[in-house]
Image (spheres, grey):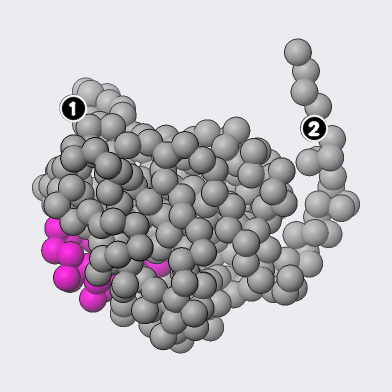
């Protein structure tokens, strides 16, 4: 395992135009590589932020085949980076539902891991209750935790709403996870209150680096996202961040420092289960 890693979180303002989103993602990934990134993380729904959740059904792909997967494999290979592909819609076997899936590609363009989003965003938010989301209407929930092995250590993969469930990340620790990735499309309403708070909490309680790549802007008349993509250290410090709009944030992750923190502040070893 290497001692350090230069990581990038890619922030986008994706729309319903898939071709335009592919163009934007490609340019931002090139920017990340030019900044020296060895690992790049795309946001949730980077290829499509439609007017309804059911728009995902139109551009779904079968795992292992399709232009979105070919795009990610090609960019990882051409740029020589590890790519954590935010999320795309993959066929679930149910005509009315897809999986919201994050695929991990190595620098040769091979898909080395897949995670299907477990926790679905079925909520009513806002003081007047007029902002409602029902991901389960078009998305099937995943069932398995995914940890991707890389030269930089084991990376725990999660997506957006998963961030609110700390037990998910605790289970990842049994697989020696040192980095957590959170591609997301946090709403502006919830992001303002909870995004940074939750990200820093996950970093501190697990003594992990957290790489959070968000959607950040106005996508259509109905949907606005919070952005504020950031990279956080195991002590809860924000190493790099940006507010809204498309862009790239990069930071150097000192993996030796992480192991030093875990040794000198052994909270993970002090855990006890109490009935």
Neighbourhood count class around disc 2 (C-alpha, 10 Å): few under 14, some 14–19, many 20 upward: few
Residue 193 seen in the current view: no
User: Which residues lie in the magenta part?
Assistant: 9-25
Residue topped by disc 1: 130
Which mark is nearer the camera, 1 or 2? 2
Residue topped by disc 2: 271
Magenta stretch: includes residue 22: yes
User: How far apart are the alpha carbons under marks 1 and 2?
Assistant: 41 Å
Magenta stretch: includes residue 13: yes
> How many numbered marks, from 0 up?
2
Q: Position of residue 250 (x, y in %)?
A: 52, 72
119 relative to 215 in the view: left or right:
right
Decide which of 6, 93 is in the foreground and name it.
Answer: 93
Decide which of 29, 146 is in the foreground and name it.
Answer: 146
Work out whether mark 1 precedes mark 2 in sequence or the reverse, and give the earlier one.
1
| Label 1 secondary element | loop
- Disc 1, disc 2: CB below 8 Å? no
Q: Position of residue 154 (x, y in %)?
A: 65, 58
Residue 121 drawn above or below residue 128: below
Residue 176 is marked as: none
């Amino acid at each position: 395992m290497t001692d350090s890693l230069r990581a990038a979180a890619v922030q986008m303002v994706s729309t319903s135009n898939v071709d335009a989103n592919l163009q934007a993602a490609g340019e931002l990934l090139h920017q990340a590589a030019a900044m020296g990134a060895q690992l790049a993380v795309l946001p949730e729904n980077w290829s499509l932020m439609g007017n309804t959740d059911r728009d995902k059904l139109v551009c779904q792909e079968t795992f292992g085949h399709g232009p979105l997967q070919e795009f990610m494999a090609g960019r990882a290979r051409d740029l020589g980076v590890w790519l954590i592909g935010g999320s795309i819609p993959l066929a679930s076997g149910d005509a009315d539902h897809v999986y919201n899936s994050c695929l991990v590609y190595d620098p040769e363009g091979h898909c080395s891991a897949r995670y299907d989003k477990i926790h679905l965003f079925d909520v009513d938010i806002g003081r007047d209750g007029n902002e409602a989301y029902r991901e389960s209407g078009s998305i099937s929930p995943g069932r398995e935790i995914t940890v991707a092995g890389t030269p930089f250590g084991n990376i725990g993969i999660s997506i957006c709403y998963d961030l609110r469930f700390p037990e998910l990340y605790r289970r990842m620790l049994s697989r020696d996870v040192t980095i957590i990735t959170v591609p997301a499309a946090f709403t502006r309403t919830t992001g303002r209150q909870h995004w940074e708070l939750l990200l820093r909490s996950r970093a501190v309680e697990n003594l992990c680096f957290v790489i959070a790549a968000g959607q950040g802007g106005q996508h259509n008349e109905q949907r606005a996202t919070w952005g504020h993509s950031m990279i956080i250290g195991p002590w809860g410090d924000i190493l790099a961040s940006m507010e809204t709009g498309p862009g790239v944030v990069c930071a150097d992750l000192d993996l030796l420092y992480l192991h030093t923190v875990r040794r000198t502040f052994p909270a993970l070893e002090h855990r006890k289960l109490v009935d």
